[in-house]
Amino acid sequence: MAAYVRIGSTAEMPTPGQAREFSAAGRMVCVANVGGRLSAMDNVCLHRGGPLGQGFISGGKVVCPWHGWEFDPLTGAATHNAAACVPVYPLKIEGDDVLVLIS
């Protein structure tokens, strides 16, 4: 059964324009902050398995640091092919805790 998992505090989250990796339920999750809005998606780039959470934000997209593939942090869709999507996870804030729903 899926459950929300704490990944950190609000103070540990990336600042606007940044992405960061967090461990959640045995997998790595990329949390991106686009314009002050946090979103969570799988951390593995579909191209060559690059760590998306080590990338950066450009034009509202998470850019993989290895080969530059770009993903929409709200939908997980690759900019060059909307059919290529990384999983996106619901994220919520409860008090100072940031939680992600891993299914």
Image (tube, rainbow, N blue to C red):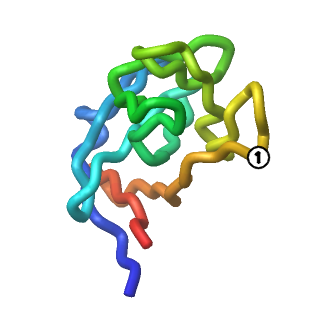
| Residue drawn at the location 53% of the way across and 19% of the way down | 63
Q: Which residue is mark 1?
A: 83
- Image location (x, y in percent) of residue 23: 22, 49
Q: As drawn, is 27 to the left or to the right of 102?
A: left
What x and y, as percent, mark residue 21?
29, 35
- Quadrant in which residue 94 is drawn: bottom left
Q: Quadrant of residue 79?
A: top right
Q: Residue furthest bottom?
A: 1
> Is 11 displayed left or right of 36 in the figure?
left
Q: Residue at x 50, y 57 (%)?
A: 89
Residue 68 place in picture, x, y as percent: 54, 14
Pick whichever, 74 or 27, lies toward us: 27
**Residue at the front extreme?**
48
| Count of numbered marks | 1
Q: Is 38 drawn above or below residue 96 in the view shown?
A: above
Type of amino acid at the residue the image marks with label 1: Ala
What residue is rendered at 24% in x and 64% in y?
Answer: 25
